[in-house]
Structure formats: C-alpha cells, structure tokens
Amino acid sequence: MEESGIEEAGSAPSMSLSRWVDGSEVDSESPPWSIEDVDAAGFGEEHQSMLRRRLVKKPRRVDSLDVEAMTVSNAHRHGEKDISIWTTLAMAFQTLGVVYGDMGTSPLYVFSDVFSKVPINSEVDVLGALSLVMYTIALIPFAKYIFIVLKVNDNGEGGTFALYSLICRYAKVNLLPNQQRADEDISSFRLKLPTPELERALCIKEMLERRSCLKRVLLLLVLMGTSMVIGDGILTPSMSVISAVSGLQGEVPGVNEDAVVIVSIIILIVLFSIQRFGTGKVGFMFAPILALWFFNLGSVGIYNILNYDTTVLRALNPAYIYFFFKRNSTKAWSALGGCVLCITGAEAMFADLGHFSVKSIQIAFTSLVLPCLLLAYMGQAAYLMKFPSSADRIFYDSVPEILFWPVFVIATLAAMIASQAMISATFSCIKQSMALGCFPRLKIIHTSKRFMGQIYIPVINWFLMVMCIIIVTTFRSTTDIANAYGIAEVLVMMVSTSLVTLVMLLIWQTNLFLALCFPAIFGTIELIYLSAIFSKIKEGGWLPLVFATFFLCLMYIWNYGSVLKYQSEVREKISMDFMYELGSSLGTVRVPGIGLMYNELVQGIPSMFGQFLLTLPACHSTLVFVCIKYVPVPVVPQEERFLFRRICPKDYHMFRCVARYGYKDIRKEDHHMFEQLLVASLEKFLRREAQELSLEMSLPIIEDDDEFVSSQIGVDELQVPLLSDKGAHRGQSSTSEGSFLSFHLEEDTGLEYEIAALREAMDSGFTYLLAHGEVRARKESWFLKKLVINYFYGFMRRNCRAGAANLSVPHMNIIRVGMTYMV
C-alpha cells in the first residue's frame, strides 16, 4: 500500500527550502537559498543579515544515537594526512604482529611441500623452485597488493566488502531498497560521479543498475570472497602451529606424531583465548617476537648462503622457471600447489587495512618482510644444493645446531602470531558483512578506544578454535593440511582482482588498456596457481571449499530473507489517509511519555505501529520512529548522522529519526544517556524548525511560488522538506513588519508549548516499542523458497543477536508486539 509524497507533512509550505529543518542535510534536487537570491528579491540589509545568519550558521547537534563514539578519539579518520611519521612507524611495527605473521612463517613449510612433489635430482630443481617462490612473492604481495590493491581502499578500510561498499556508492547495486538521496551528501561518501565524456564508466554503471542478475552475481562474488577469508582463517592457525611444533619430531627422542598434535592443540587454545584482549594489545605483544623472527630468518639465510652456496643468486634469472617445468613437467605443475603457500596471508594485508594504514603496511613489507623472506628462501635453497636429502625438514635442518632451541621457541611463537593475521581479517570481514545486511547479528566487542577497527567477535573466535582443533586432530601432519591449504587464499585473491578491475573501470576511470592489464597479468597468474591447487581436492582440498560453501549459503540466505522482509514492510506500511482519519488522538488515549519505535523503514509508517494501536489501550503523547540504517561508507561523521522529520501535523507529536551508520561505526548506547541526548536533539530540531518557518513567512511570496510547490509534492517524502502546519498560511502575501512580528510571537508560543510538552513526556519516562517479527513464505511460494525462508532464515533470526540487545534497556521499559511478515 503506497503513500503519497505528502505523507509526513499534512500540507505543503508556501516556499520549500532544500535543507532539512535541522539545517544540516540537503535532500532536494533544488539548490539551497543563496545570498544572491535574496539580493534579487529586493530585501533590505537587515533582512539580508538575518537570512545570512539563519542559513549559514549551522548549530552543532548532539549525536543521540552514537554515544560510545564520543569516547573514541580519532574515530572518524578518513585519511592519513594527520598521522605523524612516528605514529606511522609505530603502526608499521604493529603490523608485524597482526598482518605479516602468516606470510612470515611460510618458510617453515614451503620447500618441504614443494619437494614432496618434485624430488631433487639436480641443481635445476632447486634453482627453479627458488625462482618460482621469489617471483611469486614479487608479483602478488609486492606488485599487486603493495602498489595497487592497497590504494583501492574505502576511506582506509580494506577487504572484499569494502570494495563492494565502494562500488555501491557509485552504482545502485545494493539489493536492499533503502537508499536515500541525502546519503550522497555525507562527507565520507567522497563521491565523484563519472563525467559524461567517459561513456564507458556510465555504460557500466547503467548496466549494473538495470540488470538484477548482475547485482546478484556481484553480491555472490563478494560473499564468496568473504567466505574464503573465513575458510582461510580456519586453516591458517592449524597449518602454522603444527608446522612449527613438528620440529620436535626427529629432534627430541620419544616425541611422536601424537605428541605433536597434543602440543599443537594446547597452543591453539592459548592463542584463541587471548583474542579477547584486542588486536592492539596482541599486536604490540606479538610485534617484538615477529621482529625477532624476521631477523632470525634474514640472518640464518645470509649464513646459509655464505656457508653453503652463493650461486643460488642465479635464481634471479626467471629462465630457471622454464627449465624447472621442462625437466619435471606434470610434477612441476603439482609443485605449484606448494609454491603458492609462500603468499598465504597476502590477502590479510588488504583485509586488515582497517586496523592500520596504507603507509604503515607498505613500510613494514618493503623494509623488513620482503628482504628477510627472500634471504630465508635463498638460504634454504643454498643448504639444499649441498644436502638435497634434507627437503622434508629443510627449515630446522638449515638452522645451525646451536641455535635450534632458540629458533624453535621463536618459530612456535611466530606460528601463533601467524594465525593472528587471518583471525583479525575474519573478524573484520564479518563485521562488514553484518553492517551491510549479509550476516546474522552477533555480539561485537570493540577492544580499543583509539581505533574503531579493532574488534573481537566471541562466537566466531570460539568457532574458529573448535574447527582448528578438529582439523589438527584429523589431518595430523603438515603435508596433509598443506593439500587443503591455499585454495581459499587463491580464490579470494581472484575475487579481489575482479572487484579491483571493476573499481578501475567504474570509479578510477582508468585507461581501458591499463585496466585490462591488471586482470590479464595477475588474474592469469592466479588461475595458473588455482589449476594446480585443484589437483589436490581429493587429498584434502575439499575442506576449505566446504567451509566456504557453508558460510556463502549462510550469508546469502540472510541477505535474501532480509531483502524480502524489507520489501514486505514497504508494501504493508500504513497510509497517511488512515492516520488523518484517526486524528491526533490516533483513535486511542494519549498518555504522557515518549515511545521510541524501532523499525527499518526510511519512509512511511510501519505496519507494526498499527499492531500497537490495536493491542495497547493507550498511546504515548510523543512518538519517535527510530530507523537505524547502514550506508555504504566506513564511518558517518557524527554531525551528519541524523535525518529528523515531523510526521503529520504538530498536534500529532510524531517524529521520524533516521540514524545513519557506516559499516565501521560503533553503535552501543547507554539508555539513560541515549534518552537525554535524544530529547536534546529533538528540542534543537523543533527550534530549528520554528526558525526556518519564521524565515519563510518573512520572505515575499513570488508569483510562481504555487507552481514550484506543487511540482515538488510528488517527490519522495525524504527529498522534500515539508513543514507541518504551514498550509494554513499558503497564499498569504503580507510582508509587513507587524504581521511578521505577530506570526513570530505566535510561533514562539507554539514552540515553547511543544517543548514543554516534550519535557513533560520525558519526565513520564521512555518506552521502547519493538516488533518480535516472524518471516514466513506465502502459501503459493515455491517449495525451495518455503524451505529457505521458513526454516533456514527463520532459524537464524531466532538465534541471532536481537536488535534490542544493542541497547542496555531494562526489560520493564520494552514492549514487544508479535508480527508475521508474509514474503
């Protein structure tokens, strides 16, 4: 049941400003009033001065829906200009303990896995494998991520969902139809629409917006990338820890495979238990250990090169890659699956970007991580040139005997830290997907008061721990886990390549040849590695695909059900004609108090309000419809968070508040502070409304004003700044000072009366009106839709974190009404 464009206004005003009545948001396509317009109208200097003050001065509003963000310093950091060099270096040091742990521990198992497929029969085998590893690191982490992908960030936020959010800002590809024109005026949008000259970008934008199948394909691509990151987060701790602990086997008498598994499980339990302390604390605690680890890799590598064979530097010649494949043919192809393990964790450089900054990640990689890794691999290759039979235990055998125990301890600690990269990336991806409506609501703990990106999700943390223990117990060796490792990493890299290419074409508007070179080069490399890894599906490679498929189905079903539920609410919203028939009493008794009705509609009155009117014997004297909406930006500045509107004429005392959040924003409120700030914001809204109403009535009515207003009535209600109770003044053209003062006094009296009524309602208390909704498929729906909605989506809704859980509200202040949404 659709509503007209005058839904929340009552009657149209005589003149329509293009600002909301709180003076902060531009929601109409018509330009705002300017001083030049006033001069043309022939005003005196006094009126010009008054108008300039009222239109230019912007009151600072208290944000009543982001209480905790007030305590977070530097919460809305969109760029890196204000970060000092010392802060950047400190963050670069932290990245060692969070971002580079996985890639840093790859020397533990890369060559042992490669040479389990290809026996060492000549120096060509060693030099070819070394050359493959060196150029893989140089092309994927260094060339692709450091120089290109890190720059395709969403205001400092990385990951597949950040790319999807960035694309959603430039093309309407989000399946949830709650977009508003006012969202584009948020400063963090940083929107630069394609110019008419670049027809290619416009054609891509139009094609994405027109075809719903492309929207779904894009969403599935993003969900698949996120699912692969989660799958990688399960395998990384298992692989890293067991590969480090396996050094005991063969070195310490009596240590067998069972002992290695038990020690690995103990370490995994400790690792996941310390996650609750937060990324920042873990990063500073782990960073010195990783710095020592990289120093160990580099120094041992130099020792091996100088002591055994300096000719391994010949591997810088990529011709040895050709010789390697020519000599070993299909075995060399299978060995690529082991070679790709040297870049596992590369995606964490992008996914963990929200925890740090682009420069800090770049500095750490180029100055420490890259040279130490290359020296480590060259050192191991030099050792294999002289002792080819040591391929199975190449890392520990290449370490001088006197340093075994110190290196073992550091390696074990480094393996724990290696897992931190993908665990943090998993938390970030799930937080983003929850904000964009693609994951059931879970409890999120923000572990830092300085940086908003550092979070901890208890349910996911313990789920990852249980899965890691099961994998270690089942596979029991690095060789078997390595068969399953790497598939998820390569698949998520391919998703990133696809999304970055789309960003280049749609947003960056890069030259077509250069834009296509990116997927042609890096996409081809990743396809080659993927084809090699797929050969190991039967040997354990199916495991990450099972995990990824599970999470992909979970996220898609949640998004699908949420979209259908929202569409159902839009169809069944209450018409304004019905509200006018009820009158200001709403067909019941209005008792003192403020009712806060949470709903998902950005326009219209939700059907749940009708259920409350039918169920409750009385209604609150002041009603506020609160809509929490996420927009495709990392953060929404505090001063731009609200869109306030009045619903119906003034005597109804009904308001709408749309609170906009980014997918990185914190939303956790103390209900007492929340209530006080909400009333303060509402008072400022009422005063601003009265000021602009007085200002409009003080302006002369131009001849074609009626035509201007009537042309605006059919527009979306959230784009027309209609002010209630102004229809009675329509057509009046008196601009005398006496009539203006009379009107101004009348408005002041009405304003003070309304504010007094609001404060009286506040003293009577707040009630949170929430819907306990059940979503059911229609009887005529297909069997598959009924199965998905009634059982899978219904199960997730019943067991996910309720929306009211974000508010610490006493249960006695909450009223719920049962709703059934037929979709």
Image (cartoon, helix red, strand yellow):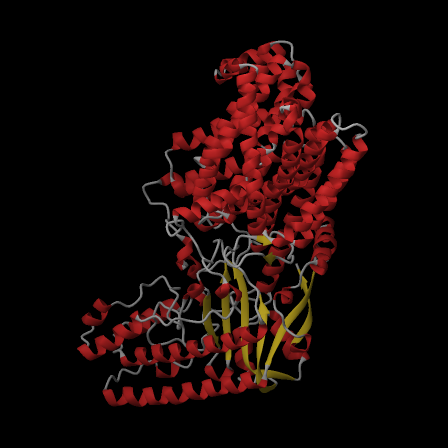
Q: Kindly tell me whether residue 657 is visible in this rendering.
A: yes
Is 45 placed left or right of 731 in the picture?
left
Q: Kindly tell me whether residue 98 is visible in this rendering.
A: no
Camera-side residue of 777 and 663: 663
Q: Position of residue 75 (x, y in %)?
A: 47, 58
Residue positioned 31% across, 77% down in the render:
696
In the rendered image of this protein, does residue 54 appear above or below residue 398?
below
Q: Position of residue 324 (x, y in %)?
A: 58, 13
Q: Quadrant of the N terminus?
A: bottom right
In the rendered image of this protein, does residue 693 appear above or below residue 321?
below
Q: Say how many tags the image has.
A: 0
Q: Position of residue 408 (x, y in %)?
A: 66, 32
Among the 4 quarters of the image, the one containing residue 588: bottom right
Q: Quadrant of the C terminus?
A: bottom right
Residue positioned 51% across, 46% down in the render:
164
Camera-side residue of 216 and 813: 813
Residue positioned 59% across, 26% down in the render:
529
Q: Position of residue 612 (x, y in %)?
A: 64, 76
In the rendered image of this protein, does residue 644 appear above or below residue 248?
below
Among the 4 quarters of the image, the one containing residue 690: bottom left
Is 161 placed left or right of 268 in the picture?
left
In the rendered image of this protein, does residue 304 appear above or below residue 355?
above
Is 51 placed left or right of 385 in the picture?
left
Is 815 placed left or right of 149 in the picture?
right
Camera-side residue of 774 and 358: 358
Residue positioned 65% across, 69% down in the render:
771
Q: Which residue reaches farthest front? A: 402
